[in-house]
Image (cartoon, coloured by chain):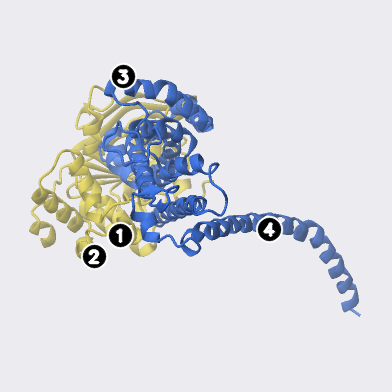
Chain colours: A yellow, B blue
Amino acid sequence: MDKVDACGCADPVVETDRVIVRTEKLNLHYGKLQALKDIGVELPANRINALIGPSGCGKSTFLKTLNRMNDLILDCRIDGRVYIDDVDIYGDIDVVDLRRRVGMVFQKPNPFPMSIYDNVAYGPRTHGTKSKTVLDEIVECSLRRTALWDEVKDRLRASALGISGGQQQRLCIARTIAVDPEIILMDEPTSALDPQSTLKIEDLMTELKKSYTIVIVTHNMQQAARVSDNTAFFLIGEVVEYGPTSRIFNQPTEKRTEDYISGRFS
Amino acid sequence: MANPPSRKVLGRINLYYWKHENLGRGLVTGFGIFLAGLTLLMAGFLAVKGLSTFLVDHVSPLEFLFSTKWSPDADVPAFGALIFIVGSILISTLALLISTPFSISTAMFVAEISPNLGRKVLQPAIEIFVGIPSVVYGWIGLSVLVPFIRRSFGGLGFSLLAGSLVLALMIFPTITSLAADAFRALPTDFREASYALGATRWQTVRKVLLPAAMPGILTGVVLGLARAFGEALAVQMVIGNMIRIPGKLTDATVNLTSIITMDMGNTATGTPWNDVLWSMALLLLMISFLFILLARTTGQKRRSLK
């Protein structure tokens, strides 16, 4: 942790169970197809919240409602309420500002075809930071927090496409935290990575939850059990069960949850 | 006794393959080789004809490339082609400077800002642009552009400016369609990543997509330049064909393609004058070869980036 302290951007560890994301009767349709049904969940801040469930159950769709990436899809209709910090994000808000506050890491590492430095500096620059000193600081700090600094500090000006897949994904996380979000959404962030890189990202998540709220979609049940504090089980657009990960995995109240977790679900 | 029957089958397989594999493959290969051979023959012919200026007529290559003195029918003839070379370079470069901003903007609009309108309206319009014969471009230039320039800026109207504008219009679809393809070839990941960081669409297009598409756009620019260099008819109709280096945009001038089309009918085969025209044709071929090479290398860079 002294590394983070050295660059002066470590946030204090928050241990309150403040609710940061709250949804009420959230329904989402793609055309005529209903993808989310009456979702009502409360996600606490500074925790890793895992969303699990079979393919097509709506967990990725739910994730994308939190930073309004679904806005980019034609024919997508959303009813109900999504509150972040008690502000309805489908009300009269600035989407650009919302996406700065709610960052996203994708399934496939997707660095921009530019240098490592420019990738991390892209967000701050986009939001108006011009000073070279400030940018340098943000880049170093973000790369340190994603444990990438020592690996790339000598080639910050080299193309981001030249580093390994695992490094690219950590770079994408660094790029996300460079704009200082409150929430980080992760859509199966390790499914394209080898086990070792996966482990590094999981360690990183545990580290990052001290400063950020993490919502992660994962197909890897062990991953959900290993890293998350809370787990929501999605099935055909509904949240079947939501609660502390240890309870969901050890004593699920719903039969369907138990079936899925024990692999008896098709 | 196991071998003979299998050999028979093998015989039948050979015949089968001859009919259904070798014949078709041979035919296609034959056509391919024929065309490649034809290209080589044409290049060879041009080289023999073009080089005889220097080898048979003993015109110095340096004089040809760097002298502005063009008097092919004088008692002591001079064959300096610099005026034509400069004319070609000036017209093409100007055309490119005029056309590129429009092309890149249109490509952005078609590929990123309004794909729907782009596909329905702009794309067909661009395709029509490609199909218009160059004589039509030249004629429109002659009857609209030339009088307009004469009235607005003075001079003859036939000018470097008129030539560049007509050429700019002609290479616009080439650059636009290649640039639009370059944008479309970019993975959606870049767009998503940029939006997710809170960038607006314009910021995404300008800061992420444009740099990423640049190699493809440059390929389009180079091919546009190649087309501009080789275009003869439309340019010849509006450029004025005065053998001098233009002092300003509204001056009439001449370029390589124009002098070839104008003089080729007036000269007898085998005379130095005729040979020099072939040398110019050879020069055009070499320039276009250079452009294709350039387009290939920028294209390669694009592939290696992915």
Residue B29 circle label: 4
Nearer the observer, disc 4 or disc 3? 3
Give the residue number, with chain letter if any, for mark 1.
Answer: A167
Q: Earlier in the sequence, mark 2 or mark 1?
A: 2
Q: What residue type is disc 1 on?
A: Gln
First in sequence: mark 4 vs mark 3: 4
The answer to whether the residue labelled 2 contacts the one labelled 1, judged by CB atoms less than 8 Å apart, is yes
Label 4 or label 1, whichever lies nearer to me, is 4
x, y (%) of residue A221?
A: 40, 52
Q: Is residue B53 above or below residue A181?
A: below
The amino acid beneath tag 4 is Thr
Callout 3: SS: helix
Give the amino acid type for the residue marked by disc 3 in the picture: Arg
Q: Which residue is mark 3?
A: B151
Question: How far apart are the alpha carbons under marks 4 and 1?
Answer: 46 Å
Under circle 2, the secondary element is helix
Q: Which circle, 3 or 2, is nearer the viewer?
A: 3
